Amino acid sequence: MRSFLILCIISPVLAVPAFIPWAAREQSVLALQGGRKPERPQDGGFEGWYDPRTNGGRMLDWATRKRGEPLNVIISAFSDPYVLTETGFHAYAKSIGFSEECMGLHYGQIHEADLGDGDGRKEEQFLARQTYFPVWGTCWESVAGGNHFRAWKQNGTLANSGAWFLAVSKEEHSGKHHTIIEDGYNIGRDLLVERAAAGSRWNGMWWLADVEWREGLLEPGNHSVNHGIEQDGRVAILTVQRL
């Protein structure tokens, strides 16, 4: 009885009903979202994303005719279904310190990416900038520089994983035309991963990401990399769950 009373007291703080088991709560969330959580393979099959190179894509986006920026973070399809939606992904980005561009105005080039899903090269679906403070925080990033990412969803007919592919980097201030800082691809990726793995919160929702590091998807070095900046070739696979 004492344990039940304690749970009833703390559950509003945790925003978790004390009388609903975790598994049942997870299923109810999925039902409300109208989605099913993909199951992890037992035989090494579907990994929550597809390698873009299999169907002629690549793990660099297209910033110019020949050069691109590394797709160095993947949000796995094994993540919470809400994160895989556009609305949910925007909310999750806010929880780890990113937001839409200043006053909705786009600064810089539109990048394209070919995720090997049958859609060919498609324009970035989301450009998020580091938000330094709650109101108009991305406006300061547009001036002072900082972390940012572009994102594309892998959802074409040839490879409909539902995963998000991110090109993350840290950039210079506007006086240097937002070029990428030295080692900016590795630094930007690592900063985002650090925030995701530490756990985050936005608008009453709590999130935590598991991280898996993969090599072999990107060639280390600076071959065809925008601005000729070296990068280590590692890709972070994030599986984001709601707590």
Image (cartoon, grey):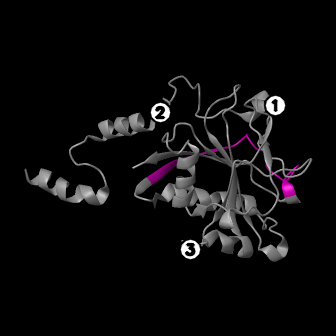
**Residue type (three-letter) at the residue carrying disc 3:** Phe
Residue linked to disc 1: 56
Residue linked to disc 2: 35
**Residue type (three-letter) at the residue carrying disc 1:** Gly
Image: 135 above or below 2: below
Q: Is residue 107 magenta?
A: no
Q: State the residue lying farthest toward the top.
A: 43
Mark 1 secondary-structure assignment = loop
Mark 3 secondary-structure assignment = loop
Of tags 1 and 3, the one toward the viewer is 3
Q: Residue 164: horizontal and vertical position, in percent?
A: 63, 43
Mark 2 secondary-structure assignment = loop
Residue linked to disc 3: 133
Please name the residue shown 63% across and 59% down the image: 190
Instruction: Write down the region rendered in magenta.
Output: 207-226
Please name the residue shown 42% across and 54% down the image: 205
Q: Is residue 209 magenta?
A: yes
Q: Dot 1: few (<14), some (14–19), or many (≥20) neighbours within 10 Å?
A: few
